[in-house]
Image (cartoon, rainbow, N blue to C red):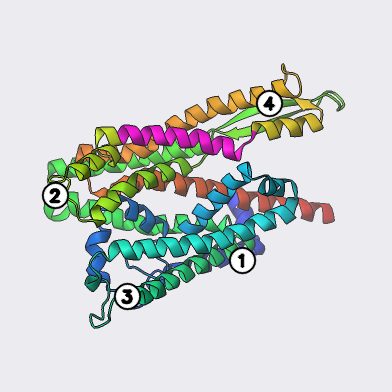
Amino acid sequence: MIEKFKKIFSDPEIIKHLAFTILILFVFKVCTFIPVPLIDINGIKNTLQNNDFLTILNTFSGGGLSSFSILSLGISPYITASIIVQMLQMVIPAMKDWQEMGEVGKGKANRVTRYLTVVIALIQALALLLGLGTRYENLFWVKAFPVNWFYLVYMAIVITAGSAFTMWLADLITQHGVGNGSSMIICAGIVASIPKMFATLHSDYLGANANAGNIAKYVSILVIYILMILGIVYFEAAKRRIPVQYANRQGSEHSEIPLKLNSSGVMPVIFAQTLLSIPTTIVGMMGLSTSSNTGAYWIDQIFSTTKPIGMLLYILMMIFFAYFYSFLTIDPDKMGDNLSKQNAFVPGFKPGEETKAQISNILFRVTTIGAVGITLVALVPIIVQLAFGASSAVTMGGTSLLIIVGVAIETANQIETEAENKESYQTIID
């Protein structure tokens, strides 16, 4: 391990990439403190608090939403656009052909994703401003301004430009830095929010509130988080290797196809949380009380993850999206066709349909384990909150740790591979 670190940090090229990535992330964080023009931050802080959907959005914007900065939406419109384009490539033949066109097709998909990002960002910005501005006199810091669509559209365009700027920063990291730019920006936003979460826990259980019971709760939460980190590291690194045999190669050469236990990543959790949070967000923005309004009460019961029905729906949605996204990113039919072209097959199964069916069965079983794993990771913070009476700041802990560990492992592997490739190249030259 020490030798690996020496190899990595003795390479000036890798150091340059790391420094460039840190610089871009610093620029991103600084921009999260630049407020949207005309906005009254104090007038909307109450709306931003205790709102699950806006909490998720704030985490992925690196805290930009809490200060209602020009980067309030962060990278989330780009992620949404990427998911939509991936889905469209499955159902639209013209877009599906892009996958067979190599770099040209990839370039077309990227252009469509960028254009769609701008459209989604503008829609989200307008929806955010309209939702927060149910009483428009509380939206502007200059009360003399007449509230009309001109000012709302102006501020929405500023927020949209901020999302486009974030997308550009992510591209810079991907091209000239370390790791995937979008993942690094999301990870940076989550890491920036962790100190605030632990500060909240400290103020709730220690300091003026310190007693034997609260100290025990604080230590228990820390132990649970450490165990979660260890479990997620093992979970993210676990793979199921499918043996592959090449019939036309000398000695029937064997190979393997590695399938990650959690091939869907954190996307099922994000999808489920976002969809469940939208109805409760609308109820909160409309100012409806769950205690006096029957409709608001049942929406809270059905869509709140802290209620029995809401938690069950949350689990079912995570499992569904885990299967959906795994089979979206890993196509057993395409994988089987590629193996057939190379005259390869899974031992014990004939090339073609039998091999495809076996890969599909293995992916289904692996995804089942992965779905259970991410469900447990997502539920532990909610259970901790209910059991210990912790602040709502803890509820994003499981998802956050899953993203951080996943990005860390992916980035570390990329750096290590780059260092090994350069060493091999240098050995060939010498």
How far apart, in angstroms, are the residues tagged by discs 2 and 4? Answer: 59 Å
Which residue appears at 63% of the width and 33% of the height? Answer: 258
Label 3: element kind: loop
At mark 2, the secondary structure is loop
What is the distance, in whole Å, between disc 1 and disc 3 at their CAs? 48 Å
Q: Which residue is mark 1?
A: 16
The segment highlighted magenta reads: 311-331
Along the polypeptide, which appears first: circle 1 or circle 3?
A: 1
Judging from the image, what secondary structure is the residue with disc 4 in? helix
- The three-letter code of the residue at mark 1 reads Lys
Residue 172 percent location from the top left of the image: 59, 65
Whichever of labels 4 and 3 marks the residue nearer the N terminus, that label is 3
Q: Can residue 73 be seen in the rendering of this structure?
A: no
Q: Secondary structure under badge 1?
A: helix
Q: CA distance from mark 1 to mark 4?
A: 44 Å
Residue beneath disc 2: 210
In the rendered structure, which disc, 2 or 1, sits on the residue that comes first in sequence? Answer: 1
Amino acid type, label 4: Lys
Q: Is residue 175 above or below residue 88?
A: below
Label 3 environment density (alpha carbons within 10 Å; few <14, some 14–19, many ≥20): few
Q: Nearer the viewer, residue 237 or 50?
A: 50
Residue at the spot of label 4: 356
Mark with earlier residue (1, 4)? 1
- Residue 100's place in the image compared with 33, above or below, is above
Q: How many marks?
A: 4
Position of 242 relative to 92 (above/below) = above
- Judging by the rendered image, the residue that carries numbered circle 3 is 148
Q: Residue furthest front?
A: 148
Give the image quarter of residue 259: top right
- Residue pushed farthest bottom? 144
Does any portion of residue 403 appear in the rendered image?
yes
Q: Real-space Cα distance between discs 2 and 1?
A: 46 Å
